[in-house]
Image (cartoon, helix red, strand yellow):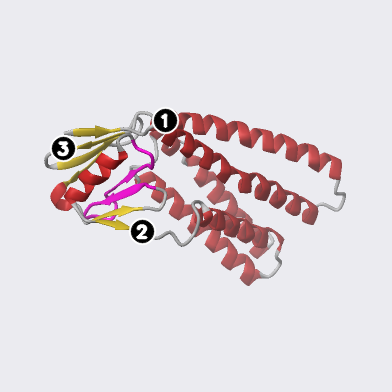
Amino acid sequence: MQQFKVSEKGLGEIKRKTWLRLVPILILVPLFITFLNYHNEIDFDLKREALFLVILIIFMVFVFARTQRRQMDSLKTYELTLENTMIVREQFGLPTIIIDHRDISVIEKNRNGSFVIRGEQASEFIIVPPNMEESELLEKMLGDLHTIQKKEQKFPDGIISGITSLGVLILMALLYTSENKIVIGVSGALVLITMAFGFFYIRNSKHFDDSLKKNLWIVWIIIFSVLGFIYYKLTGT
C-alpha cells in the first residue's frame, strides 16, 4: 500500500491558477450588470454605478477568498492510496471514491501533470492533482496498473469554463434586453437548461464538498426567478 498527498508546490500552483480564473469573472459580471442597468434606466448615474460596482467587486473577492480557503483546507487532506486490489481517494468533506484495479478503463495524463483515473461507469473517476508528492513513483505505479494515455489539451486551462460563463452572460443579456419572443424563449430555455444541468451535475458528483451542495437551493430560487421573468416578457403580465 502506498499513499500520496498534494505537495506544497502543488497547493500553491492550484491557488494561483484559481485566482487567475477569477479575473475574467471580475471583469465580465460588472460589465454585464452595467450594461443591463444602462439599457433599463433612463436616468443612468455613472457615479452611482461606479460605487455599486466597487462594492460588488469587493464582495465577490471576499466570497471567493473564503470559498477558496475552505477548498484549499480540504485539498490539504487529499490522499490517494494505491492498495493491492484498489485505488482509493479520500478527502475531507467529499465522499470516498474506490476503483477496483480490474475496473480501471482509462488512465489519462494531462499536460499540467494531473491524472484522471476512470472506472467502468462514467460517474466513477478519480482526479489526481498535479505536483503530487513522489510524482515519479506515482506515475510508475499507475503505469503498472494500466497504460497511461497522454491527453492533448486543445485549449488552455480554464478556457472552456470561461467561454461557458461568457455564453451564459450573453444569453442573459438577450433575455433581459430583447423584445423578440423567439429570442426570449430560446435564450431563456438555454439559460434554464444550463442551470439545471449544473445543479444536477454538482449534486450527483463526488468532487464537490457537502457545504456547496447544501447551498444549491439558491439555484432553484434563480431558476424560478428566470421562469417568472420569461413568463412576464412573453405575456406582459
Residue type (three-letter) at the residue carrying disc 3: Glu
Does 207 sit left or right of 34 as displayed?
left
Which of the pair 11/97 is nearer the observer? 11
Whichever of labels 2 and 1 marks the residue nearer the N terminus, that label is: 1
* Residue 139 visible in the current orientation: yes
- The residue that label 2 is drawn on is 151
Magenta span: predominant SS is loop
Does 48 sit left or right of 125 as displayed?
right
In the picture, the disc for residue 111 is none
- Specify the quadrant of the image occupied by residue 133: top left
Residue 94, percent from left and from top:
34, 35
Residue 50, percent from left and from top:
80, 41
Circle 2 Cα neighbour tier, 10 Å, few/some/many (<14 / 14–19 / ≥20): few
Q: CA distance from mark 3 to mark 1?
A: 24 Å
Against 236, is 112 above or below?
above
Residue 236 lies in magenta, yes or no? no
What residue is at 62 percent from the left and 71 percent from the top?
182
Circle 3 Cα neighbour tier, 10 Å, few/some/many (<14 / 14–19 / ≥20): few
- The residue that label 1 is drawn on is 8
What residue is at 87 percent from the left and 49 percent from the top?
43
Which of the pair 138/79 is nearer the observer? 138
